[in-house]
Image (cartoon, helix red, strand yellow):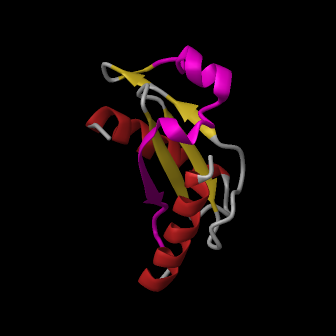
């Protein structure tokens, strides 16, 4: 994930934190086209709210690509990188975070 993608992902996570009290973090899937699929989850690793497709080109927000508009970023074969942004302050223990991380990353492999 490059700096522009990370910045956009953090902005999205901030938006989720201010609008969804249940969210504990955001799963980020970087796709082969440069788009990012972002999905908020709760303290149990279950989805809360809708996932979103994000795109950055040259430091600016742009529309998602045609492939993502067509498949909504659901083709798991297109995922280059997956990571989690924990919303702050994170009140979960390291053990809880590790358990949730395994759950959300395993779920992302099925996409």
Q: Is residue 85 magenta?
A: yes
Q: Is residue 78 above or below residue 88?
A: above
Q: Is residue 22 above or below residue 34?
A: below
Location of residue 104 by image quarter: bottom right
Pinpoint residue 36: horizontal percent, then vertical percent: 48, 36
Location of residue 48 by image quarter: bottom right
Find the residue positioned furthest to the top: 66
Callout count: 0
Q: Nearer the viewer, residue 69 or 6?
A: 69
Q: Is residue 65 magenta?
A: yes
| 60 on left or right of 53 | left
- Residue 91 seen from this side: no
**Residue located 46% across and 76% down the image:** 98
Q: Quadrant of the N terminus?
A: top left
**Residue located 58% across and 68% down the image:** 103
| 109 on left or right of 9 | right
Pinpoint residue 78: horizontal percent, then vertical percent: 49, 35
- Residue 34 seen from this side: yes
**Residue located 42% across and 30% down the image:** 32
Range shown magenta: 62-91
| 48 on left or right of 58 | right
Find the residue positioned furthest to the left: 3
Pinpoint residue 60: horizontal percent, then vertical percent: 38, 20
**Residue located 51% across and 70% down the image:** 102
Pinpoint residue 74: horizontal percent, then vertical percent: 63, 37
């Amino acid at each position: 994930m490059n700096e522009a993608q990370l910045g956009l992902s953090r902005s999205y996570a901030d938006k989720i934190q201010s609008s969804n009290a249940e969210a504990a973090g955001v799963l980020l899937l970087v796709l082969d086209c440069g788009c990012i699929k972002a999905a908020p989850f709760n303290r149990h690793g279950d989805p809360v709210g809708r996932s979103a497709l994000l795109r950055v080109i040259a430091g600016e927000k742009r529309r998602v690509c045609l492939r993502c508009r067509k498949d909504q970023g659901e083709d798991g074969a297109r995922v280059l990188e997956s990571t989690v942004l924990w919303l702050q302050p994170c009140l979960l223990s390291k053990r809880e975070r590790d358990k949730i991380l395994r759950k959300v990353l395993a779920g992302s492999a099925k996409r």
